Amino acid sequence: MTSPASFMRTHVCALLLCLGAPAGAAAPPAHWVSSWFASPQPIWGSDFVLPTGLPDSLDHQTVRETVRLSAGGGRIRLVFSNRYGLEPLALGEVRVALTAPDGQALPGGSRAVRFGGLASATVPAGAPLVSDPVDLAPAAFARLTVSSFLPGPTPLRTFHWGAQQTVAIGRGNLTAATVMPAPQHLPGRLFLSAVLAEAPRTTRTVVAFGDSITDGNGSTPGLDRRWPDLLAQRFGNGGVAVANAGISGASLLGDRMGVNALARFEQDVLSQPGVAAVVVLIGTNDIGWPGSPFAPTERAATAAGLIAGYRQLVAAAHARNVRVVGATLPPFKGALQGTPFEGHYSAAKERLRQEVNAWIRSGGAFDAVADFDLLLRDPADPARMLPAYDSGDHLHPGDAGYKAMAGLVSLEMLFGDASTSP
């Protein structure tokens, strides 16, 4: 029977088997885990209330991204996504380097990334592309800089918005340049969707699956203070990799700033190499968006609809022997008040949140419950976030709130045991 952690169950897995090994060679006894991840999103139009901040396309330019790993490994692979592309994505050259926190390359230089032994590659429309193994041996929490040259006109249809990160764009092939001259900075991520690490076989991947709270809105930009980052810091030296599958504006049932949770759960969670557990924190936008500037004509969500959606996620995960931690929805009284997006909160929406949270706690569908509502709420006004944890918009936690969330999630919740030491 195929292991639930096996990479054989997706087309990404098929690519892994085909790349980097000579014909007839035995498959290496590697255990790949997802050490870093950014969920791909489809681009949206200028008619939406939030602009992407991106150009329509790039041409003969280099995209440079810095990522921080969770688990380390002997080798790495890069994964590029063209999930929502309508045409092939051409990569002219890709290089990766270990990077200091200040962004400077560490001694040892960058490494060329190969695809089936070649320096260039094409990512088919709708597909991912996995690189050959790269002998870089990063430690846990290492930072990597990935520089990708786009040799021709490249429409931006697949990206990751926000995440408190920026990418640098430079003219020409600058993949080997130590410093990118006069870069243009754009929000989010472009095409790079994952870094896989070849880790000890006991290492397990945890996926944080959710919306902007998982994506880190409200945390300090560029400092990796989202709650999944801080969870990785707690457990990364003890055999836990963390993949962040949060999308700002995401919802359980509707297509918003990304496709609905049910549509992306297979690719963003169950297809992660080494996945053993998922923390599901999603539903706030299903409740808050209808009737607000984000979705002014949308009908209100119902508890029955949300509960049915959660049950589907749990059923899909359990079919793969993946453990599911259900997270209660944090309080958001006064959310975005005084901004052009006011309308996220109402007394009726609060009653719905309470009903959904009561089911998450006592419905028995989840293997464990992370009660973020209880953790983050103000005892003097339980519908509101505690000021010490509030980023200031009354919807997203700040750094202190995210640290508290990471501290609440235990190994017993994630794996049903405490066999992995922090």
Image (cartoon, helix red, strand yellow):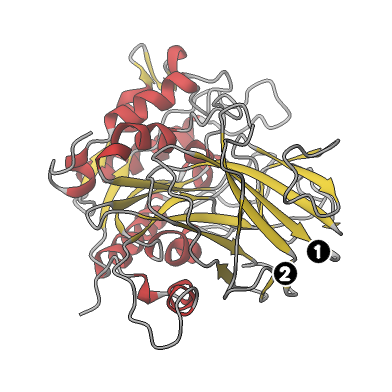
Q: Amino acid at mark 2?
A: Leu
Please identify the quadrant where the C terminus is shown. top left
Q: Is residue 358 above or below residue 271?
A: above
Residue extending farthest bottom: 24
Position in image of residue 338 (x %, y %): 68, 20
Please identify the quadrant where the N terminus is shown. bottom left
User: Are the residues flagged by discs 1 and 2 in contact, CB closer than 8 Å?
Assistant: yes
Q: How would you rate the neighbour count of disc 2 (Cα within 10 Å): few for under 14, some for 14-19, many for 20 or more?
A: many
Q: Residue at x 71, y 62 (%)?
A: 93
Q: Please tell me the numbered disc located at residue 89.
A: 2
Residue 280 visible in image: no
Circle 2 SS class: strand
Q: Please tell me the numbered disc located at residue 98.
A: none
Q: Is residue 68 left or right of residue 162?
A: left
Q: Residue at x 41, y 66 (%)?
A: 271
Q: Is residue 87 above or below residue 365?
A: below
Position in image of residue 286 (x %, y %): 51, 47
Residue 405 visible in image: yes
Q: Is residue 408 left or right of residue 382?
A: left
